[in-house]
Image (tube, rainbow, N blue to C red):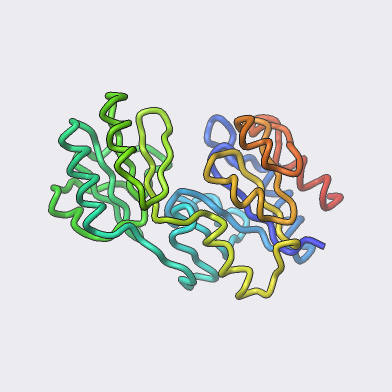
Amino acid sequence: MYRIVFLDIDGTILNSNEQLEERLVEAIIQVQQRGVLVALASGRSLVASEIYGEKFGCSIYVTYNGSLVFSNNEVIYDVKIPSELAFQLCSKTKEYNGTYFHFLNKTSRSNHPRPGIEHLLPQATQSNLTDTKSDAHRLALYIDDDKDRASLSAKITDEYVFEEGNRLEVYPVGSKWAGIIPILKQLEISTEEVIAIGNGINDIEMLEAAGLGIAMGNAPDYVKKRANFITEDNDHHGVVLALEKIFNL
């Protein structure tokens, strides 16, 4: 019997137009009505996750790729990138004529704020490098030059980093699954009672560790290979179809 479902946001519950479709909200509510918890696990902040979680009454959020975890508005897990490293990476990004975003809790600082980028909520405030001399839950480093970006990525050895286009995502050592473990302990839920659904590199560990790991049809092949089964993509109701099959909705 499954007792909790962890859902990724981008590329999973959101379609290609970054929309959360009503059909999925209805399916999630049906699952919850059967006594199964549904949580969000994302690289986003709490602010950016609640936009969607509030639509179905979500009370558990694994944010910043597992760095900051909330259960019923209570912080139950919190790890950060050390201030010295955060400052060093932001400084180097600026040196490469790039743009840095420094996230801490519900705040974001940047040398070139970009309003309107959904996944970068909370909206960044204009800052100088001195402002980045603090711990961070997440860094988003935009560097257009491939060589400069590769050079900076190679220097990040003690944190978790992955690349999407011209953006380097940097998080504290850990993963979404590392943030999920404290929730399972708090609720006395075993790993066999967990379902995880996702599409990205940062979903791999939770897909492998969960009792049932489901990859989206739009996930890369190396992600699909780590899952128990593959559902349809995010433009063809992948999450809905998986939930309907598992819970006989």
Query: Number of callouts in the render?
Result: 0
Along the horizontal axis of the image, is 58 left or right of 84?
right
Vertical position of residue 244 compared to residue 230: above or below: below
Q: Nearer the viewer, residue 64 or 123?
A: 64
Q: Nearer the viewer, residue 231 or 159?
A: 159
Residue drawn at x 59%, y 68% is 183
Vertical position of residue 125 compared to residue 217: above or below: below
Residue drawn at x 28%, y 60% is 82
Q: Position of residue 80 (x, y in %)?
A: 35, 61
Q: Nearer the viewer, residue 248 or 79?
A: 79
Q: Position of residue 127 (x, y in %)?
A: 16, 48
Along the horizontal axis of the image, is 44 left or right of 182?
left
Residue drawn at x 41%, y 35% is 163
Q: Quadrant of the N terminus?
A: bottom right
Q: Position of residue 46 (x, y in %)?
A: 44, 57
Vertical position of residue 2 compared to residue 90: above or below: below
Q: Position of residue 185 (x, y in %)?
A: 62, 73
Along the horizontal axis of the image, is 185 left or right of 151?
right
Return the residue found at the far right: 248
Residue drawn at x 30%, y 39% is 141
| Displayed quadrant of residue 36 | bottom right
